[in-house]
Amino acid sequence: MNTLEVRNIKKTFKLSKKQQKIEKSNLKEKIAVNDLSFTAYPGEIFGLLGPNGAGKTTCLRAISTLIKPDEGDIIVGGTSVKTDSLIVRGKIGFLTSELKLEDHFTPNYLFTYFSKLHDVDIETIQERKIKLFKRFGIDEFMEVKVGELSTGMKQKTSIAISLVHDPDFIIFDEPTNGLDVLTARSVTDYLIELKDLGKTVILSTHILSVVEKLCDRVGIIINGKMKLCDKLENIVKDNQKDDLEDTFFKLVLEEETVGAF
Amino acid sequence: MKNALTVFRKEFYRVVSDKRLIFMAVFLPGLAIYVMYSFMGNAIGNEVQDIQEHTMIIYTENAPQDLIDLISADDKPSEFHLTSELSQSEIETKVLEGEIDIVLQFPTDFETLLTEFQEDDFEIPQITISYNPGERYSENSYWTVGYHLNQYRQAIVYERHGDEIYAFSQTEEHIVDEDKASGQDFAMLLPMLIIMFLFSGAMSIGPDSIAGEKERGTIATLLVTPIKRSELAIGKVLSLSVISLFSATSSFIGIILSLPKLMGAEGGELSTDIYGIGDYFAIFAVLLATVLVIVGIISCISAYAKNIKEATMLIMPVYFISIITGVSSMFSGEAASSTMIYLVPIYSSINMIISILTFEMFPIHFLVFVLSSLVYVALLIILMTKLFQSEKVMFNK
């Protein structure tokens, strides 16, 4: 079953003196996520929403096996990130918001490189490359160095690279950040296509309109805790607000974290 | 190992497909050394020739003709004038300005005074030599004239006392292994330069390859692929080592080709013909082992640093320590005899290079050096793997 279950995870980071200054805190540790749980199902886009520092990136990194939860576990398609991280890595496609591809390489080279690291055979690499590059309009630029590509084309290349192995679980952190309307539309359309293909998609974004348009269910994280997790319309209705933005602000204000946002 | 090879190929391709990078990392070090040393050699050669061909402007007062004849017979051309042509202050000004190289002032009736050496009231004649030590022609004239003045003095002593004045005479016989002597010249210069260029070669690409991945965020994409962290570490270290080795080889060739020019200009004779193919293979093996250790150190530091700038900053102290270690070889030119020394990274490399260059390599030292280097590389790869596995180092610094 291609479900992704986040089970009561907790992650604590030690704070350096420099970090304590930035956080304006005397505490030596910071709980990034605490008792966080949710489940994402195949054929749905699950949106993770929260102010800056709420714990979204920590949660996504834990799902992607980049960090290990101190407590709890994450089960990706029946595999634990704690015990079988190598297997989990083969199942997920992860796009980080901080990714900047190396300027010197072409999309073609990078696609092949990451495909090989995912142990994809040569024939499949070519098939996937043609399909994804055509889908994103990269095919004409596949031999152009990344440094010479537009921001939109770079982001599309990053997305294609994160999907080289046709993963069942797709974890995208701010995939439309800094993109123009046309490119952003192309990305969001593709996420819908992935969902229709039965993939499990987890999306973290600040853009509420994207969440409203794409996400079947939403989890709102504030101060490392899951504040709400439900279908979009239920969240809005239960909080007696007109839209997601109003609901989101209400929840954040309740937690007195509006300053951080 | 398949994945390590994929990482190796990609990192290798990153350098070789970038013409600027390949020029900067591989060709430039050798070319720069060759041009720099050849230029220095030519400059020193020209300087020596210029001084040799310079006509010494000598002003004299009451100078004996025999001394003037001796100086005139020297290979260095000379031109004599009398101090009476100028005032004392004019002479001093011209010495200061470099128009006069040296002034020799003898007492009146100097030659008559010399004959009165047996009289009771005999006083040793005082000669005044004026020159400018801050001016190269003047200083060189002082040494040339001083040499002939000494010859002249000895001739006078011989005239007065004959052979009896000399307690003994001497002849010199040079019993020397020319190859070893040349080897020692190489051993005093090469180790420091080799370590310096091995380091700078690895430094030019290492931080970008590893700390750069963190800076660009590509490390996360790389770490979510199902490859082992150790494969990633091995792939990175191997590719950087090969490129650094190219860089070091280029530097080595540059040094070998230019050193004879540099040493030749200083009047020495240096030829790399003294070394056989076995010596070159041994040097290459030492370079390979050393480059692996250096790349391992640089890679670990780069993996620890959060960006390229921090990596470069953290590598600098290690680089300076290595240079200082290399400088130590410049004073002795002899390899350490204790086997334990060959366990100390970098210092062992320097001693190995010296021992090969001076034809004094012991197989046990070579074996200890190679094996210990391999152990260090393995430990550094394990450390790098741990760093790649560390959440704090990778994502929370």
Image: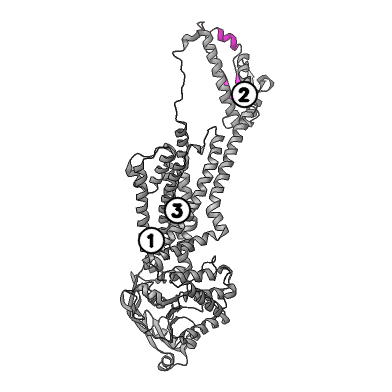
Question: Disc 3 to disc 1, how far (Cα)?
Answer: 19 Å
The residue nearer to you, when weighing B15 against B312, is B15
Which residue carries the number 2 mark?
Answer: B75
Residue drawn at the location 46% of the way across and 33% of the way down = B181
Q: Chain ID for label 1?
A: B
Name the amino acid type tagged 2: Asp
The residue nearer to you, when weighing B319 against A199, is A199
The residue nearer to you, when weighing B316 against B190, is B190
Does label 2 or label 1 sit earlier along the sequence? 2
Which residue carries the number 1 mark?
Answer: B384
Q: Quadrant of residue A64?
A: bottom left
The segment highlighted magenta reads B104-131
Q: Secondary structure at mark 2?
A: loop
Question: Disc 2 to disc 1, how far (Cα)?
Answer: 65 Å
Which residue carries the number 3 mark?
Answer: B316
Q: Quadrant of residue A45?
A: bottom left
- The quadrant the N terminus of chain B occupies is bottom left
The x and y percentages for residue A93 are 44, 76
Name the amino acid type tagged 3: Met
Name the amino acid type tagged 1: Met
Q: Is residue B206 above or below residue B122?
A: below
Whether residue B123 is visible, yes or no, is: no
Is residue B310 left or right of B390 when viewed as pictured? right
Indicate yes or no whether the magenta region holds residue B115. yes
Q: Secondary structure at mark 1?
A: helix
Q: Secondary structure at mark 3?
A: helix
The x and y percentages for residue A87 are 37, 74
